[in-house]
Image (cartoon, rainbow, N blue to C red):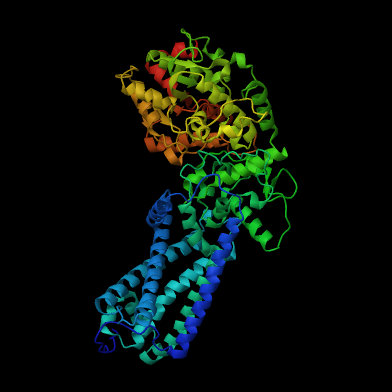
Amino acid sequence: MIVPLQAAETPTPTRDTFWGIGGVGEVLFYYLTALVVVVFLYGVYARFARYAEGDEEPIDRLDDLGSRIVAAAAIVLTNEKQFDRDLYGGLMHSFIMWGFLTLLIATTVLGIDMDVWQLALGRESFWVGDFYLGYQFVVDAMGLLFVVGIGMALYRRYLVRNHRLWGRHTSSEDDLFVWTLFVLGVGGFLLEGLRILGNGYPEFEIVSFVGWGTALALEAAGVDQSLAASLHWWMWWSHALVALAFVAWIPYAKPFHMLSSFANVVTRDENSARRLPGIPADLEATNAESIDDFTWKELLDQDACTKCGRCSAVCPAKASDRPLDPRDVILDLKTYREELDAGMTDEQPIVADGGTSVIDAETMESCMACMACVDSCPVEIEHLNSFTRLNRQLVDQGDVDPGMQDVFQNVMQDGNTFGNAARNRADWADPLEFDLADAREESVEYLWYVGDYPSYDDRNKKVARSLATILQEADVSFGILFEDEKYDGNDVRRVGEEFLYLELAGHHVESFEACDFEKLVCTDPHSYNTFENEYPEVDFAEFADDPMMPFEYDGYWNQNGEIEVLHWTQAVEELVADGRVGLSGTELEYTVTYHDPCHLGRYNDEYEAPRDLIRATGCELVEMPRNRSDSFCCGGGGGGVWMEFDEDPKPSEERLRETLEDTDTAAGATVEKFVVACPMCMTMYEDGRKTGGFEGDLEVVDVAELIVEALGKEDVATGE
């Protein structure tokens, strides 16, 4: 057993910060520190000066700055997004961050005591007695937590080799960052152990329990008090130089994310993705010809990326082997910007279909606009803002997928994505036993925007008739726009066709303004999202005098939310709750699972209304492993429903396989029906059921079809 040396008598618990360093060493340390601070501040200034060269943001991201900082601090300190879907990663990052912040605060407190309290103000040190003992205990405890967190990071990166951490942008910089933190953490405890051993184990230093244990281990390894004192000088300078070099390095490499990530959270848009960047008043302006066409926030997004790969892990396009990795797009833009600024590369197209460019057109065409990347990012990177800018540039250049070009042409000529005659838009309702009201001619409670797929797609027509039957049974006043209804524009906007979107938005707000109704109800979550979140953002006055714009509406529409916009499940849930839809006592004895549509769930946080309606029919609802905000896109968003991709498996096939294998196992029962609440989801899953060979295994149905079956009206709804 090792017996500690006799503790030296110390009147008051404290210690000499520069023990064994000497006066010259102390002066040299302060000189190096001043130099490092200058290098650090210059690097930070250069970063933010570069952001200022970016384009102006369409929204105010610095309003109510105090509240933003407080909210951001709460998000960062709780690590709430780090824990999402990854307990290990959340704990690891929490240990590292809380440990690092504690050590930073401790160093700051010591600097204030030495340089301000004592030197500048001439006071007695407060770093003594009980304060010192508490300080040392907390620093050791949190420093140990820091080292444990770094150890977890090393284990995940190099032993487990977590797939998220390795990609095209993984570099030696990442290795240097994590190993520098490890050296700082372990080196700090070695330094403390040498000091305690070299001073003969002062009794009060036992509060530094990790340092005390390190001293015992060093002594067991043959280091005596004299050798410890000698080694302490070398260890002190080694630790100090590594720490100073790290601080100087922060603004110039990956460690800068410690600052840029917090700034990114402060300046976040809580409605990002559900509302895309504002329409430029000059529709002829460039979108992404140059890296400086990107806004300052989009440049900050690039620097905030920590390469954690969470966006990559949840991206359905990447899972389907489409040529898209959200992380790579953000980092490709960053790398190009930095190399261009450093003179290491020549200017090239930001995005193009073929030839040399920073981003390939096929990469952007692969995006499903599902918002999974934005939702999963722990530092609030707004991927879809940058992606939309790239898509707008592709449209400007004419580098658009042929399938999308056909859709654009159909919408421009016929007002719908199918290219069918506008006069046939309400033909889906012909088999109904009642007539639909014309909302242009009479007042209604609900103005129902039916949408393209329920109007023209045979499978979705049954859903439209089901919903019409439900509203009729509820005895509510509802009507439609007939041929004045056009495509809503949500997805053509997400593939970059801003001009066409604006034309559609102007047409619809004029149509809505001409009607007398209380609530606007949408069949499609995509329509719901654009009416609820994007139409109110457009200042139509900027474009009303443009001869290319066939509308006269002048101003904002529904900016203050006077008109309630609802997805149909929300509207019918209200009717069921009011007892206007007779579902009490109904028993459909099916075991079903429900797929959350991206534009209803992640985009608009509506998860319960469809589930409440499913349960109201008497069905047993079991959840898929990936549900609610973790739902996996069907593949139809962002124009995917109109384009052909070489992918295996299709997102819809993967989701159906998950239902048949993982959901069945978890539920302990066979899922009979795969339930959706989105026309695009219906289209994609019916296709996936055929191409994946699942036709005999389960049925794809809409929530509305379950309800009409529970009401005993399925024959009317289907037109049979």
Horizontal placement of 344 versus 585: left or right? right
Residue sitting at the far top:
433
Residue sitting at the far bottom:
226
The total of numbered circles placed on residues is 0
Question: Can residue 245 be seen in the rendering of this structure?
Answer: no
Question: How far from the left and from the top, in percent, is residue 260?
Answer: 51, 58
Residue 107 to residue 226: above or below: above
* Quarter of the figure that contains the N terminus: bottom left
To which quarter of the image does residue 500 belong? Answer: top right
Horizontal placement of 135 versus 390: left or right? left
> Is residue 300 or residue 152 the one in the foreground?
300
Question: How far from the left and from the top, in percent, is residue 36?
Answer: 52, 75
To which quarter of the image does residue 287 belong? Answer: top right
Question: Can residue 335 be seen in the rendering of this structure?
Answer: yes
Question: How far from the left and from the top, in percent, is residue 375?
Answer: 47, 45
Residue 664 to residue 58: above or below: above
Question: How far from the left and from the top, in percent, is residue 361?
Answer: 68, 43
Residue appearing at x 25%, y 84% in the figure:
12
Residue 370 to residue 567: above or below: below
Residue appearing at x 53%, y 70% in the figure:
40
